[in-house]
């Protein structure tokens, strides 16, 4: 794959109004933005195409002040890709909110068990499965190694499994001041979404 460059001579000609130079600059910028979206931010081809188009339009609007198109395009694509991922995460969260733990589908016991877990385990499970974070994203947010999050997830799911089946760890994972009563009537802990 050839490296895409933006020579100063081409940039200066495009700034001065040379239509042919601008066409060349636009083609290079679009290809560069497309490659960045796919290679650096794991975007699907359609999303990378949309973001490349928006980034090159913005390049055109800011051409007069442009000094380093490659750096500027990378920053622009990064911003647009992160914004797209945030929107998608919120859309998934909106879909997840329609599920009710009170629905009569046999899962009420599982929610009771989740609320009986320690705060750390409950937050971890909710961040991973309710908020939609990946292990890598959660590790970055908590400033720990990804392997740490993976180990905590395994431990927390083991505890949840034991609680659900009434295993030997059921009493050990209860916090001081928490009882084994069902969750109904108790408020969600501070900073966590209310699941009722």
Image (tube, grey):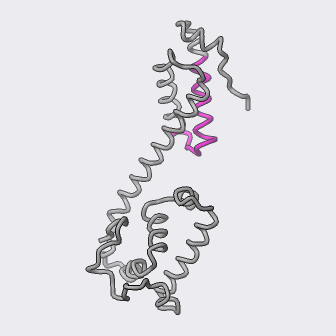
Answer with left or right where residue 183 lies relative to residue 148.
left
Query: Is 104 rendered above or below residue 48?
Result: below
Please report the bounds of the magenta region as a residue range: 25-47
The residue closer to the viewer here, 175 or 64, is 175
Residue 7 x, y percent position in the rendering: 67, 17
Residue drawn at x 46%, y 78% is: 118
Quadrant including the N terminus:
top right
Residue at the (63%, 61%) spot, across then down? 145
Q: Nearer the viewer, residue 76 or 43?
A: 76
- Residue at the (53%, 76%) spot, across then down: 156
Relative height, residue 73 to residue 48 (above, below): above
Q: Residue at x 46, y 65 (%)?
A: 129
Residue closest to the far front:
176
From the top left corner, tell me how far across and down residue 4 is, in percent.
68, 26
Q: Can you say which quadrant of the picture contains the C terminus?
A: bottom left
Is residue 101 rendered to the left or right of residue 140? left
Q: Main secondary structure of the magenta part?
A: helix
Q: Is residue 192 above or below residue 38?
A: below
Q: Position of residue 185 (x, y in %)?
A: 26, 80
How far from the left and from the top, in percent, is residue 14?
A: 56, 11
Examine the structure image and report whether residue 94 is included in the region drawn in magenta. Answer: no
């Amino acid at each position: 794959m050839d490296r895409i460059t933006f020579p100063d001579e081409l940039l200066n000609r495009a700034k001065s109004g040379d239509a042919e130079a601008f066409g060349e600059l636009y083609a290079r910028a679009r290809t560069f933005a497309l490659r960045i979206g796919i290679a650096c931010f794991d975007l699907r081809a359609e999303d990378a195409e949309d973001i490349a188009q928006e980034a090159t339009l913005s390049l055109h609007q800011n051409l007069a002040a442009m000094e380093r198109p490659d750096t500027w395009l990378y920053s622009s694509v990064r911003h647009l890709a992160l914004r797209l991922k945030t929107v998608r995460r919120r859309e998934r969260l909106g879909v997840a909110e329609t599920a009710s733990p009170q629905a009569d589908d046999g899962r009420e016991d599982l929610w009771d068990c989740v609320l009986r877990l320690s705060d750390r385990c409950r937050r971890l499970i909710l961040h991973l499965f309710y908020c939609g974070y990946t292990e890598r994203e959660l590790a970055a947010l908590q400033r720990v190694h990804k392997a740490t999050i993976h180990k905590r997830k395994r431990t927390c799911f083991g505890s949840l499994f034991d609680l659900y089946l009434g295993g030997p760890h059921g009493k050990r994972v209860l916090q001081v001041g928490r009882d084994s009563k069902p969750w109904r009537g108790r408020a969600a802990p501070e900073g966590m979404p209310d699941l009722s």
